[in-house]
Amino acid sequence: TPHVINGKFCFFFFFCFTGKNCNHNIDDCPGHQCGNEGTCVDGVNTYNCQCKPEFTGTNCKDDVDECQLMPNACQNGGTCHNTYGGYQCVCVNGWTGDDCSENIDDCASAACYQGSTCHDRVASFYCECPHGRTGLLCQLDDACISNPCQKGSNCDTNPVSGNHFCTCPSGYFGASCDQDVDECSLGSNPCEHAGKCINIKGSFQCKCQRGYMGPRCELDINECISNPCMNEATCLDQIGDFHCICMPGESAHGFGENNLTPMY
């Protein structure tokens, strides 16, 4: 209800306003209940609390769960743990920083041999060795430098002992891959259809029986492919040979129909 004071209308709404002309809003912020460094914003017979990002609620006393609000707050597989007024990231091995975005420089504490180049990785490092050195830290002499393995094989050095070992190509064996494998004496005959196996350096060859061909004598030669039968006769392929089935009628030798005539 308005009241007239000095000829002016004033609304005494819980003493919201003051001044000669009732035109000054009473500041309700003194004694405010805004917590956690929230900022008080005066209103009419009330006030509001403007909260910092980490808090919420009428008086900024409710904690914001940043882990729920920001699902990707922790990077590179880090685990987010909410705290009152913030959050913490527990990083996986190899990562650091508030949000686990910084790769730890493992080369800072690496012990690569002098002259090698260290390459940082995630939770590890790699030593790039100079010529003549090998091993995880390039601490070993490269035993392959003298080419102990026969040409065509691969030489590798044991990263622990420094000894070389050869990976032999097909057809060779031995510490230096210098011994020939006799394929003809290994188990059954590698040549099919009774072909003769002949061992050669690093491999073998097959000498095929009549009528067969191929690296292992696996293919039957089709003697009919050159059309050896005449006068529209049908050629019948056989192993190492062929026969001609003549057309009906008397042959030169007087045989009857469907005569089976060998051709040599």
Image (cartoon, helix red, strand yellow):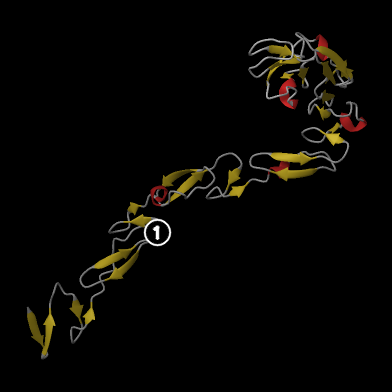
| Image quadrant where residue 154 sits | top right
Assign a secondary structure to mark 1.
loop
Q: Residue furthest right?
A: 146
Q: Nearer the viewer, residue 250 or 116?
A: 250
Quarter of the picture holding the C terminus: top right
Asked whether the viewer can see residue 222, the reply is no
As displayed, is residue 260 above or below residue 31?
above
As displayed, is residue 91 above or below residue 24?
above
Asked whether the viewer can see residue 252, the reply is yes
Q: Position of residue 92 (x, y in %)?
A: 55, 40
Q: Amino acid at mark 1?
A: Pro
Q: Nearer the viewer, residue 253 or 104?
A: 253
As displayed, is residue 244 above or below residue 159?
above
Q: How many marks?
A: 1
Q: Position of residue 74 (x, y in %)?
A: 50, 47
- Read off the residue under disc 1: 53
